[in-house]
C-alpha cells in the first residue's frame, strides 16, 4: 500500500512540473520579427527565389541598422611584441590553437622569440639584473644563478616565450634564465 501512494505522489509531482513548464512558455515574449509587416509581405510571395531575396533584403537592412547603432570599438594600438586581434573571432571558433595560428596572416601571429641588443645592464639586487634593450624595453631577471655571466652593453641576447606567459633570457651557450618585462 505504501508503494502505491509513493507512485501516485511521484506522478502528481511530475504532472505539476509539466504544467508549470508549459505555463512558462506562454509567458515568454514572442520574437519581435514575427510581427514585422515586411516578413508578412515576403511570406505572401509565391516564387521561392523572390521570397528568399525579400528575406535577405530585410536581414541586410537589420544588420546595417544594428551595425550603425553599435558604438565603434576603440582603436587598438598593437605593441611590437603583441599580435593584432583576429578580424573575425567567429571565423576561428572551433579550431585548435595551432590551426588558428596557421590560418592567421603572418603579421598577426604572436612572436615566440626575438633577438635584441642590450643597451644597458645593471645589478638591482643580490644577483638580480635589469636590462634596457635597444628597442626601449626594460627587462628584469626573475631568478638568479651564481655562476652565470650576465650580458653587458652591446651583447646580443635572445628573449623566448615560455610556458604560462613567462619568458626566458638566452645568452650565449649558458642555461636560460626566467626574465620578466618591466616596461
Image (cartoon, rainbow, N blue to C red):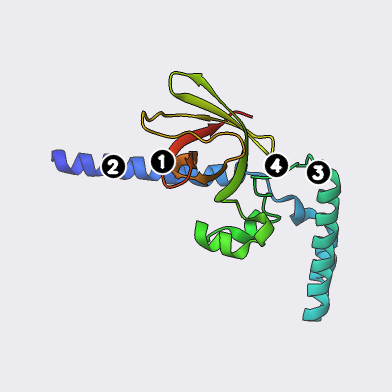
Taking the spot 28% from the left edge, 39% from the top edge, the residue there is: 9
Nearer the observer, disc 4 or disc 1?
4
Q: Position of residue 62 (x, y in %)?
A: 82, 55
Taking the spot 42% from the left edge, 41% from the top edge, the residue there is: 176
Taking the spot 69% from the left edge, 45% from the top edge, the residue there is: 80
SS for callout 2: helix
Nearer the observer, disc 2 or disc 3?
3
Asked whether the beta carbons under mark 4 and mark 3 sit within 8 Å of each other, the answer is no
Crowding near pointer 1: few (<14 within 10 Å), some, many (20+)? few
141 relative position to 147: left or right: right
Asked whether the beta carbons under mark 4 and mark 1 sit within 8 Å of each other, the answer is no
Distance Cα–Cα, label 2 vs label 3: 51 Å
Q: Position of residue 58 (x, y in %)?
A: 83, 62
Between 182 and 8, which is closer to the camera in this rendering? 182
Asked whether the beta carbons under mark 4 and mark 2 sit within 8 Å of each other, the answer is no
Asked whether the beta carbons under mark 1 and mark 2 sit within 8 Å of each other, the answer is no
Distance Cα–Cα, label 1 vs label 3: 44 Å
Asked whether the beta carbons under mark 1 and mark 3 sit within 8 Å of each other, the answer is no
Per the image, the residue denoted by label 2 is: 10
Distance Cα–Cα, label 1 vs label 2: 10 Å
Q: Residue 72 occupies which quadrant of the picture?
A: top right
Q: Along the polypeptide, which appears first: circle 4 or circle 3?
A: 3
Per the image, the residue denoted by label 4 is: 79
Distance Cα–Cα, label 4 vs label 2: 63 Å
Crowding near pointer 3: few (<14 within 10 Å), some, many (20+)? few
Per the image, the residue denoted by label 3 is: 70
Distance Cα–Cα, label 4 vs label 3: 26 Å
Amino acid at each position: 500500500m505504501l508503494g502505491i501512494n509513493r507512485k501516485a505522489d511521484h506522478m502528481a509531482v511530475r504532472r505539476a512540473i509539466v504544467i508549470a513548464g508549459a505555463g512558462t512558455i506562454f509567458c515568454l515574449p514572442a520574437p519581435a520579427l514575427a510581427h514585422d509587416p515586411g516578413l508578412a509581405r515576403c511570406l505572401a510571395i509565391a516564387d521561392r527565389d523572390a521570397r528568399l531575396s525579400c528575406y535577405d533584403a530585410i536581414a541586410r537592412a537589420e544588420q546595417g541598422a544594428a551595425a550603425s547603432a553599435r558604438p565603434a570599438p576603440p582603436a587598438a594600438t598593437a605593441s611590437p611584441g603583441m599580435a593584432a586581434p583576429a578580424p573575425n573571432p567567429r571565423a576561428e571558433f572551433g579550431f585548435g590553437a595551432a590551426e588558428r595560428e596557421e590560418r592567421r596572416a603572418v603579421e598577426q601571429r604572436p612572436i615566440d622569440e626575438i633577438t635584441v641588443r642590450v643597451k644597458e645592464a645593471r645589478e638591482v639586487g643580490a644577483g638580480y639584473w635589469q636590462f634596457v634593450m635597444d628597442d626601449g624595453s626594460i627587462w628584469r631577471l626573475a631568478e638568479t644563478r651564481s655562476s652565470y655571466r650576465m650580458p653587458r652593453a652591446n651583447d646580443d641576447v635572445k628573449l623566448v616565450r615560455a610556458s604560462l606567459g613567462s619568458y626566458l633570457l638566452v645568452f650565449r651557450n649558458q642555461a636560460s634564465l626566467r626574465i620578466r618585462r618591466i616596461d
